[in-house]
Amino acid sequence: MSEKKTFVITRFDPDKDQAPRQQTYEVPVQPDWKVLDALNYIKDEIDPTLSHRWSCRMAVCGSCGMMVDGKPSLTCKDALSDYGDKVEVAPLANFPIVRDLVVELEGFLEKLSSVKPYILRAKERALEEGTHRQSPAQLEEFKQFSYCINCMLCYSACPVVANEPEFLGPAAIALGHRYNMDSRDEGQHERNEVFRGEGTVFSCSYANECSEVCPKHVDPAAAINQAKFNAVIDWLTGFVTSPRGGK
Amino acid sequence: MKHLLLKLEPLIWLLFGQGILIGTMLLTGWILVVGLLAPLGIVPPDALTFARAHDLGSSLLGRLFLLALLVLPLWKGAHHVRSLSIDYGGVNRDAAVATLMYGVAAVGSLLAIVAVIRL
Amino acid sequence: MARPVNPHAMTPSRPGRTRTAPPQAPSGWYTQPRMLRYLLFDATGIVYLLVGFVALRVVWALGSGDAAWAELQRQLQNPLYIAFHALALVSVVFVAVRFFRLFPKSQPAHIGPAKPPPQPLILAGLYAAWIGVTLVVTAVLAGWVL
Protein backbone atom coordinates (compact mmCIF):
# COMPACT_ATOMS: atom_id res chain seq x y z
CA MET A 1 0.00 0.00 0.00
CA SER A 2 1.82 3.12 -1.13
CA GLU A 3 1.62 6.52 0.46
CA LYS A 4 -0.25 9.31 -1.31
CA LYS A 5 1.14 12.82 -1.71
CA THR A 6 -0.60 15.88 -3.11
CA PHE A 7 1.25 17.76 -5.84
CA VAL A 8 0.37 21.38 -6.62
CA ILE A 9 1.94 22.04 -9.99
CA THR A 10 2.16 25.24 -12.00
CA ARG A 11 0.48 24.88 -15.40
CA PHE A 12 0.67 27.29 -18.29
CA ASP A 13 -0.47 26.75 -21.86
CA PRO A 14 0.46 29.82 -23.94
CA ASP A 15 -2.35 29.08 -26.39
CA LYS A 16 -5.07 28.83 -23.75
CA ASP A 17 -3.99 30.49 -20.47
CA GLN A 18 -3.71 34.21 -19.75
CA ALA A 19 -1.34 33.52 -16.86
CA PRO A 20 0.16 30.52 -15.08
CA ARG A 21 -2.29 28.63 -12.82
CA GLN A 22 -1.99 25.72 -10.42
CA GLN A 23 -3.31 22.19 -10.77
CA THR A 24 -3.47 19.58 -8.04
CA TYR A 25 -2.71 15.88 -8.43
CA GLU A 26 -2.92 12.96 -5.96
CA VAL A 27 0.02 10.64 -6.56
CA PRO A 28 0.72 7.24 -4.95
CA VAL A 29 4.45 7.50 -4.17
CA GLN A 30 7.10 4.88 -3.49
CA PRO A 31 9.52 5.42 -0.56
CA ASP A 32 12.61 5.59 -2.76
CA TRP A 33 11.22 8.05 -5.31
CA LYS A 34 12.72 11.36 -6.29
CA VAL A 35 10.47 14.30 -7.17
CA LEU A 36 11.02 13.52 -10.85
CA ASP A 37 9.53 10.05 -10.47
CA ALA A 38 6.29 11.61 -9.25
CA LEU A 39 6.25 14.06 -12.18
CA ASN A 40 6.80 11.22 -14.64
CA TYR A 41 4.02 9.24 -12.94
CA ILE A 42 1.67 12.19 -13.39
CA LYS A 43 2.57 12.48 -17.06
CA ASP A 44 2.39 8.73 -17.69
CA GLU A 45 -0.69 7.83 -15.65
CA ILE A 46 -2.76 10.91 -14.84
CA ASP A 47 -2.24 13.87 -17.15
CA PRO A 48 -0.25 13.45 -20.36
CA THR A 49 -0.46 17.19 -21.07
CA LEU A 50 2.05 18.01 -18.31
CA SER A 51 5.31 19.28 -19.82
CA HIS A 52 8.63 19.10 -18.02
CA ARG A 53 12.30 18.67 -18.97
CA TRP A 54 14.39 15.76 -17.75
CA SER A 55 16.99 13.41 -19.13
CA CYS A 56 19.80 11.62 -17.30
CA ARG A 57 18.05 10.91 -13.97
CA MET A 58 21.43 11.18 -12.24
CA ALA A 59 22.18 14.88 -11.73
CA VAL A 60 24.67 15.33 -14.55
CA CYS A 61 22.68 16.74 -17.46
CA GLY A 62 21.15 19.75 -15.72
CA SER A 63 17.76 19.43 -17.47
CA CYS A 64 15.35 18.88 -14.58
CA GLY A 65 15.79 22.03 -12.50
CA MET A 66 12.52 23.28 -10.97
CA MET A 67 11.26 25.06 -7.85
CA VAL A 68 10.14 22.49 -5.30
CA ASP A 69 8.41 23.98 -2.25
CA GLY A 70 9.84 27.34 -3.20
CA LYS A 71 13.47 26.25 -3.47
CA PRO A 72 15.47 25.63 -6.67
CA SER A 73 16.16 21.92 -6.92
CA LEU A 74 17.22 19.15 -9.30
CA THR A 75 14.11 17.01 -9.32
CA CYS A 76 16.03 13.84 -10.20
CA LYS A 77 18.26 14.33 -7.16
CA ASP A 78 15.85 15.38 -4.40
CA ALA A 79 14.22 12.55 -2.49
CA LEU A 80 10.45 12.82 -2.16
CA SER A 81 10.73 11.58 1.41
CA ASP A 82 12.38 14.91 2.29
CA TYR A 83 9.09 16.66 1.57
CA GLY A 84 5.73 16.68 3.34
CA ASP A 85 2.32 15.43 2.22
CA LYS A 86 1.83 18.44 -0.04
CA VAL A 87 4.54 19.34 -2.55
CA GLU A 88 4.52 22.47 -4.71
CA VAL A 89 6.36 22.24 -8.03
CA ALA A 90 6.89 25.36 -10.12
CA PRO A 91 9.13 26.29 -13.06
CA LEU A 92 12.58 27.72 -12.30
CA ALA A 93 12.30 31.21 -10.81
CA ASN A 94 13.52 34.28 -12.72
CA PHE A 95 13.08 32.70 -16.17
CA PRO A 96 10.27 33.39 -18.67
CA ILE A 97 7.92 30.41 -18.72
CA VAL A 98 7.44 28.61 -22.04
CA ARG A 99 4.92 26.01 -20.88
CA ASP A 100 4.10 24.33 -17.55
CA LEU A 101 7.45 23.55 -15.94
CA VAL A 102 9.54 24.41 -19.02
CA VAL A 103 11.43 27.74 -19.02
CA GLU A 104 13.07 29.81 -21.74
CA LEU A 105 16.80 29.09 -21.72
CA GLU A 106 17.88 31.29 -24.63
CA GLY A 107 18.57 34.24 -22.34
CA PHE A 108 21.09 32.16 -20.41
CA LEU A 109 22.71 30.83 -23.58
CA GLU A 110 23.25 34.39 -24.82
CA LYS A 111 24.93 35.38 -21.55
CA LEU A 112 27.05 32.22 -21.63
CA SER A 113 28.30 32.73 -25.18
CA SER A 114 29.14 36.36 -24.40
CA VAL A 115 31.86 35.25 -21.95
CA LYS A 116 33.51 33.07 -24.62
CA PRO A 117 33.57 29.81 -22.66
CA TYR A 118 36.36 28.15 -24.64
CA ILE A 119 40.15 28.27 -24.83
CA LEU A 120 41.30 31.45 -26.57
CA ARG A 121 44.83 31.54 -27.93
CA ALA A 122 46.69 34.50 -29.38
CA LYS A 123 48.07 32.12 -31.96
CA GLU A 124 46.92 28.54 -32.46
CA ARG A 125 49.45 26.00 -31.27
CA ALA A 126 51.09 24.21 -34.21
CA LEU A 127 50.41 20.48 -34.44
CA GLU A 128 54.12 19.67 -34.34
CA GLU A 129 54.40 21.34 -30.92
CA GLY A 130 52.23 18.60 -29.46
CA THR A 131 49.59 18.96 -26.77
CA HIS A 132 49.29 21.65 -24.11
CA ARG A 133 50.90 20.53 -20.88
CA GLN A 134 49.13 21.26 -17.62
CA SER A 135 50.17 20.20 -14.16
CA PRO A 136 47.71 18.89 -11.53
CA ALA A 137 48.32 22.09 -9.55
CA GLN A 138 47.32 24.20 -12.54
CA LEU A 139 44.22 22.05 -12.99
CA GLU A 140 43.20 22.57 -9.36
CA GLU A 141 42.93 26.31 -9.94
CA PHE A 142 39.83 25.94 -12.09
CA LYS A 143 38.69 22.33 -11.83
CA GLN A 144 35.88 23.00 -9.37
CA PHE A 145 34.34 25.60 -11.70
CA SER A 146 34.33 23.17 -14.61
CA TYR A 147 31.80 20.94 -12.85
CA CYS A 148 28.92 23.23 -13.80
CA ILE A 149 26.12 21.30 -15.51
CA ASN A 150 24.21 24.43 -16.59
CA CYS A 151 21.20 23.45 -14.49
CA MET A 152 20.52 27.11 -13.71
CA LEU A 153 19.43 26.61 -10.11
CA CYS A 154 21.88 29.42 -9.30
CA TYR A 155 19.99 31.86 -11.53
CA SER A 156 16.78 31.02 -9.70
CA ALA A 157 18.41 31.67 -6.35
CA CYS A 158 20.12 34.95 -7.23
CA PRO A 159 18.41 38.21 -6.15
CA VAL A 160 20.47 40.19 -8.66
CA VAL A 161 19.36 37.99 -11.58
CA ALA A 162 15.77 38.61 -10.47
CA ASN A 163 16.22 42.38 -10.46
CA GLU A 164 18.92 43.22 -13.00
CA PRO A 165 18.22 41.72 -16.45
CA GLU A 166 21.66 42.67 -17.82
CA PHE A 167 23.61 40.80 -15.12
CA LEU A 168 25.61 37.89 -16.57
CA GLY A 169 24.62 35.64 -13.70
CA PRO A 170 26.43 32.99 -11.63
CA ALA A 171 26.95 30.12 -14.11
CA ALA A 172 28.11 32.33 -16.99
CA ILE A 173 30.61 34.16 -14.79
CA ALA A 174 31.81 30.94 -13.15
CA LEU A 175 32.39 29.37 -16.57
CA GLY A 176 34.13 32.49 -17.90
CA HIS A 177 36.30 32.48 -14.80
CA ARG A 178 37.01 28.77 -15.33
CA TYR A 179 38.61 29.67 -18.64
CA ASN A 180 40.41 32.71 -17.25
CA MET A 181 42.09 30.46 -14.71
CA ASP A 182 42.95 27.76 -17.25
CA SER A 183 46.69 27.86 -17.89
CA ARG A 184 46.14 27.02 -21.56
CA ASP A 185 43.99 30.12 -22.10
CA GLU A 186 45.24 33.49 -23.34
CA GLY A 187 41.89 35.28 -23.53
CA GLN A 188 41.74 36.79 -20.02
CA HIS A 189 41.81 40.38 -21.20
CA GLU A 190 38.93 39.81 -23.65
CA ARG A 191 36.85 38.07 -21.01
CA ASN A 192 37.63 40.65 -18.35
CA GLU A 193 36.32 43.33 -20.69
CA VAL A 194 33.05 41.40 -20.91
CA PHE A 195 33.12 41.06 -17.12
CA ARG A 196 33.38 44.85 -16.81
CA GLY A 197 30.79 45.48 -19.53
CA GLU A 198 26.99 45.68 -19.46
CA GLY A 199 26.62 42.39 -17.64
CA THR A 200 29.16 43.51 -15.07
CA VAL A 201 30.38 41.03 -12.46
CA PHE A 202 30.39 43.91 -9.97
CA SER A 203 26.59 43.74 -9.85
CA CYS A 204 26.99 40.64 -7.72
CA SER A 205 26.26 41.58 -4.13
CA TYR A 206 27.66 38.33 -2.67
CA ALA A 207 24.33 36.95 -1.45
CA ASN A 208 26.00 33.52 -1.79
CA GLU A 209 22.60 31.97 -2.60
CA CYS A 210 23.97 30.55 -5.84
CA SER A 211 26.56 28.48 -4.01
CA GLU A 212 23.98 27.35 -1.45
CA VAL A 213 21.78 25.76 -4.14
CA CYS A 214 24.41 24.46 -6.56
CA PRO A 215 24.01 20.66 -6.77
CA LYS A 216 27.57 20.09 -8.06
CA HIS A 217 29.37 22.22 -5.44
CA VAL A 218 30.81 24.50 -8.10
CA ASP A 219 30.68 27.46 -5.66
CA PRO A 220 29.87 30.11 -8.30
CA ALA A 221 29.98 32.83 -5.62
CA ALA A 222 33.67 32.08 -5.13
CA ALA A 223 34.23 32.23 -8.90
CA ILE A 224 32.37 35.54 -9.27
CA ASN A 225 34.26 37.22 -6.46
CA GLN A 226 37.58 35.91 -7.67
CA ALA A 227 36.57 37.23 -11.09
CA LYS A 228 35.98 40.68 -9.57
CA PHE A 229 39.56 40.73 -8.26
CA ASN A 230 40.94 39.63 -11.61
CA ALA A 231 38.81 42.17 -13.45
CA VAL A 232 40.19 44.94 -11.23
CA ILE A 233 43.80 43.82 -11.79
CA ASP A 234 43.11 43.69 -15.52
CA TRP A 235 41.60 47.20 -15.33
CA LEU A 236 44.62 48.55 -13.44
CA THR A 237 47.18 46.92 -15.73
CA GLY A 238 45.21 48.35 -18.64
CA PHE A 239 46.36 51.79 -17.55
CA VAL A 240 49.96 50.64 -17.72
CA THR A 241 49.83 48.84 -21.04
CA SER A 242 47.67 51.44 -22.79
CA PRO A 243 48.38 54.79 -21.13
CA ARG A 244 45.44 56.57 -22.69
CA GLY A 245 43.31 54.52 -20.34
CA GLY A 246 42.14 50.95 -19.91
CA LYS A 247 38.57 50.15 -20.92
CA MET B 1 25.89 58.31 -16.70
CA LYS B 2 25.40 54.56 -16.81
CA HIS B 3 28.50 54.24 -18.99
CA LEU B 4 30.54 56.38 -16.60
CA LEU B 5 29.35 54.26 -13.66
CA LEU B 6 30.45 51.10 -15.47
CA LYS B 7 33.89 52.58 -16.14
CA LEU B 8 34.36 53.58 -12.49
CA GLU B 9 32.94 50.36 -11.06
CA PRO B 10 36.31 48.63 -10.42
CA LEU B 11 37.54 51.64 -8.42
CA ILE B 12 34.30 51.88 -6.46
CA TRP B 13 34.46 48.17 -5.70
CA LEU B 14 38.01 48.56 -4.35
CA LEU B 15 36.90 51.39 -2.05
CA PHE B 16 33.83 49.39 -1.02
CA GLY B 17 35.93 46.30 -0.30
CA GLN B 18 38.34 48.25 1.86
CA GLY B 19 35.35 49.93 3.50
CA ILE B 20 34.20 46.56 4.68
CA LEU B 21 37.62 45.15 5.53
CA ILE B 22 39.61 48.05 6.98
CA GLY B 23 36.60 50.20 7.82
CA THR B 24 34.98 47.49 9.91
CA MET B 25 38.20 46.74 11.75
CA LEU B 26 38.81 50.40 12.62
CA LEU B 27 35.17 51.19 13.42
CA THR B 28 34.74 48.53 16.11
CA GLY B 29 37.07 50.11 18.66
CA TRP B 30 35.97 53.63 17.69
CA ILE B 31 32.26 52.92 18.20
CA LEU B 32 33.01 51.07 21.42
CA VAL B 33 34.91 53.93 23.04
CA VAL B 34 33.76 57.16 21.37
CA GLY B 35 30.19 56.03 20.89
CA LEU B 36 29.53 53.99 24.02
CA LEU B 37 32.15 53.69 26.78
CA ALA B 38 33.12 57.37 26.93
CA PRO B 39 29.60 58.91 26.80
CA LEU B 40 28.43 56.33 29.36
CA GLY B 41 31.28 57.29 31.66
CA ILE B 42 32.71 53.78 31.76
CA VAL B 43 35.94 55.18 30.41
CA PRO B 44 37.19 58.03 32.61
CA PRO B 45 36.67 61.55 31.19
CA ASP B 46 40.40 62.33 31.12
CA ALA B 47 40.84 59.80 28.29
CA LEU B 48 39.19 62.03 25.69
CA THR B 49 39.95 65.53 26.93
CA PHE B 50 40.38 68.05 24.12
CA ALA B 51 44.13 68.22 24.73
CA ARG B 52 44.69 64.48 24.61
CA ALA B 53 42.27 63.86 21.74
CA HIS B 54 43.78 66.66 19.69
CA ASP B 55 47.31 65.44 20.35
CA LEU B 56 46.40 61.94 19.23
CA GLY B 57 44.32 63.04 16.26
CA SER B 58 46.82 65.51 14.86
CA SER B 59 49.76 63.09 14.94
CA LEU B 60 50.64 61.55 11.58
CA LEU B 61 49.36 58.12 12.57
CA GLY B 62 46.28 59.72 14.06
CA ARG B 63 45.48 61.60 10.88
CA LEU B 64 45.91 58.48 8.76
CA PHE B 65 43.71 56.49 11.13
CA LEU B 66 40.99 59.16 11.07
CA LEU B 67 41.19 59.52 7.30
CA ALA B 68 40.65 55.78 6.80
CA LEU B 69 37.92 55.73 9.46
CA LEU B 70 36.01 58.61 7.90
CA VAL B 71 36.36 57.74 4.23
CA LEU B 72 36.18 53.96 3.86
CA PRO B 73 32.88 53.18 5.64
CA LEU B 74 31.13 55.77 3.45
CA TRP B 75 31.93 53.78 0.31
CA LYS B 76 30.78 50.52 1.88
CA GLY B 77 27.59 52.26 2.95
CA ALA B 78 26.95 53.90 -0.41
CA HIS B 79 27.50 50.69 -2.38
CA HIS B 80 25.28 48.63 -0.11
CA VAL B 81 22.44 51.14 -0.14
CA ARG B 82 22.62 51.00 -3.93
CA SER B 83 22.54 47.16 -3.73
CA LEU B 84 19.52 47.36 -1.45
CA SER B 85 17.76 49.56 -3.97
CA ILE B 86 18.36 46.93 -6.68
CA ASP B 87 17.24 44.13 -4.33
CA TYR B 88 13.90 45.88 -4.08
CA GLY B 89 13.36 46.19 -7.80
CA GLY B 90 15.14 49.49 -8.38
CA VAL B 91 17.04 48.71 -11.58
CA ASN B 92 15.32 51.51 -13.52
CA ARG B 93 16.31 54.11 -10.96
CA ASP B 94 19.79 52.58 -10.50
CA ALA B 95 21.75 55.24 -12.40
CA ALA B 96 20.13 57.95 -10.28
CA VAL B 97 20.52 56.07 -6.99
CA ALA B 98 24.14 55.17 -7.73
CA THR B 99 25.01 58.75 -8.67
CA LEU B 100 23.35 60.01 -5.51
CA MET B 101 24.96 57.47 -3.17
CA TYR B 102 28.46 57.66 -4.61
CA GLY B 103 28.07 61.43 -4.75
CA VAL B 104 27.28 61.45 -1.04
CA ALA B 105 30.30 59.23 -0.36
CA ALA B 106 32.51 61.47 -2.50
CA VAL B 107 31.35 64.65 -0.75
CA GLY B 108 31.80 62.97 2.63
CA SER B 109 35.31 61.89 1.62
CA LEU B 110 36.25 65.45 0.63
CA LEU B 111 34.87 66.80 3.89
CA ALA B 112 36.82 64.09 5.71
CA ILE B 113 40.06 65.20 4.06
CA VAL B 114 39.36 68.81 5.09
CA ALA B 115 38.40 67.74 8.63
CA VAL B 116 41.65 65.82 9.06
CA ILE B 117 43.81 68.57 7.59
CA ARG B 118 42.34 71.28 9.82
CA LEU B 119 43.10 69.34 13.01
CA MET C 1 2.41 30.82 -4.83
CA ALA C 2 4.49 33.18 -6.88
CA ARG C 3 5.33 36.83 -7.12
CA PRO C 4 6.67 38.78 -10.09
CA VAL C 5 10.31 39.78 -10.54
CA ASN C 6 11.75 42.14 -13.14
CA PRO C 7 9.66 41.37 -16.26
CA HIS C 8 12.81 41.22 -18.42
CA ALA C 9 14.77 38.86 -16.15
CA MET C 10 16.62 36.22 -18.22
CA THR C 11 14.70 37.29 -21.34
CA PRO C 12 16.52 36.62 -24.64
CA SER C 13 17.32 39.47 -27.01
CA ARG C 14 14.92 38.07 -29.60
CA PRO C 15 11.49 36.68 -28.66
CA GLY C 16 10.98 32.91 -28.96
CA ARG C 17 8.50 31.22 -31.22
CA THR C 18 5.75 31.02 -28.60
CA ARG C 19 4.34 33.46 -26.07
CA THR C 20 5.99 33.15 -22.65
CA ALA C 21 4.68 34.03 -19.21
CA PRO C 22 6.80 36.61 -17.35
CA PRO C 23 9.43 35.35 -14.87
CA GLN C 24 8.31 34.87 -11.29
CA ALA C 25 9.76 33.97 -7.91
CA PRO C 26 8.35 32.11 -4.89
CA SER C 27 6.25 34.43 -2.76
CA GLY C 28 8.17 33.62 0.43
CA TRP C 29 11.59 34.14 -1.17
CA TYR C 30 12.63 37.33 0.63
CA THR C 31 11.39 36.17 4.03
CA GLN C 32 13.47 33.00 4.20
CA PRO C 33 16.04 33.36 7.05
CA ARG C 34 19.16 33.16 4.88
CA MET C 35 17.73 35.73 2.45
CA LEU C 36 16.78 38.01 5.36
CA ARG C 37 20.36 37.87 6.64
CA TYR C 38 21.61 38.89 3.19
CA LEU C 39 19.15 41.81 2.98
CA LEU C 40 20.17 42.85 6.48
CA PHE C 41 23.79 42.79 5.35
CA ASP C 42 22.94 45.22 2.57
CA ALA C 43 20.88 47.33 4.99
CA THR C 44 23.92 47.84 7.26
CA GLY C 45 25.07 50.20 4.51
CA ILE C 46 22.69 52.78 5.97
CA VAL C 47 24.29 52.39 9.39
CA TYR C 48 27.80 52.70 7.95
CA LEU C 49 26.91 55.92 6.15
CA LEU C 50 25.45 57.40 9.34
CA VAL C 51 28.39 56.27 11.46
CA GLY C 52 30.74 57.82 8.92
CA PHE C 53 28.95 61.17 9.11
CA VAL C 54 28.78 61.11 12.91
CA ALA C 55 32.52 60.39 12.98
CA LEU C 56 32.97 63.32 10.62
CA ARG C 57 31.12 65.54 13.10
CA VAL C 58 33.42 64.29 15.86
CA VAL C 59 36.60 65.03 13.94
CA TRP C 60 35.27 68.38 12.76
CA ALA C 61 34.52 69.33 16.37
CA LEU C 62 38.03 68.23 17.33
CA GLY C 63 39.41 70.65 14.79
CA SER C 64 37.14 73.47 15.94
CA GLY C 65 38.50 73.92 19.43
CA ASP C 66 37.89 73.14 23.08
CA ALA C 67 34.32 74.40 23.32
CA ALA C 68 33.11 72.60 20.18
CA TRP C 69 34.70 69.37 21.42
CA ALA C 70 33.11 69.61 24.85
CA GLU C 71 29.73 70.35 23.29
CA LEU C 72 29.98 67.32 21.00
CA GLN C 73 30.99 65.06 23.91
CA ARG C 74 27.90 66.29 25.71
CA GLN C 75 25.69 65.58 22.67
CA LEU C 76 27.06 62.05 22.36
CA GLN C 77 25.62 61.32 25.80
CA ASN C 78 22.10 61.73 24.44
CA PRO C 79 20.30 58.34 24.72
CA LEU C 80 19.46 58.45 21.01
CA TYR C 81 23.15 58.69 20.13
CA ILE C 82 23.95 55.88 22.57
CA ALA C 83 21.23 53.68 21.04
CA PHE C 84 22.51 54.50 17.56
CA HIS C 85 26.06 53.53 18.46
CA ALA C 86 24.85 50.32 20.11
CA LEU C 87 23.06 49.48 16.85
CA ALA C 88 26.21 50.46 14.94
CA LEU C 89 28.31 48.11 17.05
CA VAL C 90 25.94 45.21 16.42
CA SER C 91 25.96 46.04 12.69
CA VAL C 92 29.72 46.16 12.51
CA VAL C 93 30.04 42.78 14.25
CA PHE C 94 27.37 41.27 11.99
CA VAL C 95 29.17 42.58 8.89
CA ALA C 96 32.54 41.33 10.13
CA VAL C 97 31.31 37.81 10.87
CA ARG C 98 29.53 37.44 7.52
CA PHE C 99 32.30 39.06 5.51
CA PHE C 100 35.08 37.04 7.17
CA ARG C 101 33.16 33.85 6.37
CA LEU C 102 32.85 34.81 2.69
CA PHE C 103 36.25 36.47 2.15
CA PRO C 104 38.69 33.51 2.04
CA LYS C 105 37.08 31.78 -0.95
CA SER C 106 37.01 35.05 -2.91
CA GLN C 107 40.80 35.14 -3.29
CA PRO C 108 41.90 34.05 -6.80
CA ALA C 109 44.24 31.06 -7.02
CA HIS C 110 47.06 33.36 -8.03
CA ILE C 111 47.72 36.95 -9.01
CA GLY C 112 50.85 36.78 -11.12
CA PRO C 113 53.31 34.70 -9.10
CA ALA C 114 51.60 35.40 -5.75
CA LYS C 115 49.39 32.74 -4.18
CA PRO C 116 47.05 33.31 -1.22
CA PRO C 117 47.54 31.38 2.06
CA PRO C 118 45.22 28.40 2.71
CA GLN C 119 41.63 29.48 3.44
CA PRO C 120 41.54 28.51 7.15
CA LEU C 121 44.67 30.57 7.66
CA ILE C 122 43.08 33.58 5.96
CA LEU C 123 40.01 33.24 8.20
CA ALA C 124 42.13 32.99 11.35
CA GLY C 125 44.22 35.94 10.17
CA LEU C 126 41.13 38.08 9.63
CA TYR C 127 39.80 37.40 13.12
CA ALA C 128 43.24 37.93 14.66
CA ALA C 129 43.61 41.25 12.84
CA TRP C 130 40.11 42.37 13.83
CA ILE C 131 40.59 41.55 17.49
CA GLY C 132 44.10 43.00 17.49
CA VAL C 133 43.16 46.26 15.80
CA THR C 134 40.09 46.64 18.02
CA LEU C 135 42.16 46.12 21.17
CA VAL C 136 44.77 48.65 20.06
CA VAL C 137 42.19 51.27 19.00
CA THR C 138 40.20 50.76 22.21
CA ALA C 139 43.29 50.93 24.39
CA VAL C 140 44.53 54.12 22.76
CA LEU C 141 41.16 55.89 22.72
CA ALA C 142 40.30 54.83 26.27
CA GLY C 143 43.60 56.14 27.57
CA TRP C 144 44.96 52.77 28.72
CA VAL C 145 48.08 53.33 26.59
CA LEU C 146 49.84 56.42 25.18
Image (cartoon, rainbow, N blue to C red):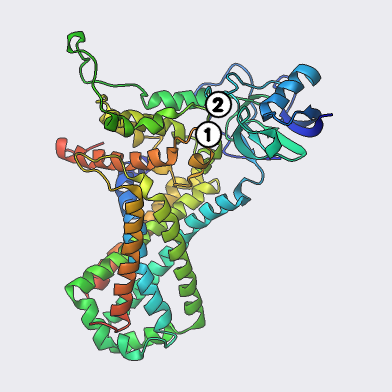
| Place of residue A4 in the rendered image (x, y in percent of width and height, measured from the top left) | 81, 32
Mark on residue B33?
Answer: none
Visible residue check, residue B98 = yes
Q: Amino acid at mark 2?
A: Ala
| Place of residue C129 in the rendered image (x, y in percent of width and height, measured from the top left) | 31, 63
| Place of residue A22 in the rendered image (x, y in percent of width and height, measured from the top left) | 76, 32
Identify the secondary structure beneath mark 1: loop
Left or right: B13, with A210 as reference point: left
Q: Nearer the viewer, residue A3 or B67?
A: A3
Task: State the image quarter where residue A42 is shown.
Answer: top right
Q: Amino acid at mark 1?
A: Pro
Identify the secondary structure beneath mark 2: loop
| Mark 1 or 2, nearer chain start | 2
Left or right: A198, with B60 as reference point: right
Could you tell me which residue is drawn at 66 percent across and 33 percent down? A79
Q: Nearer the viewer, residue C76 or A57?
A: A57
Return the chain for callout 1.
A
Query: Which residue is labeled 2 in the image?
Result: A59
Could you tell me which residue is drawn at 57 percent across and 35 percent down? A94
Visible residue check, residue B79 = no
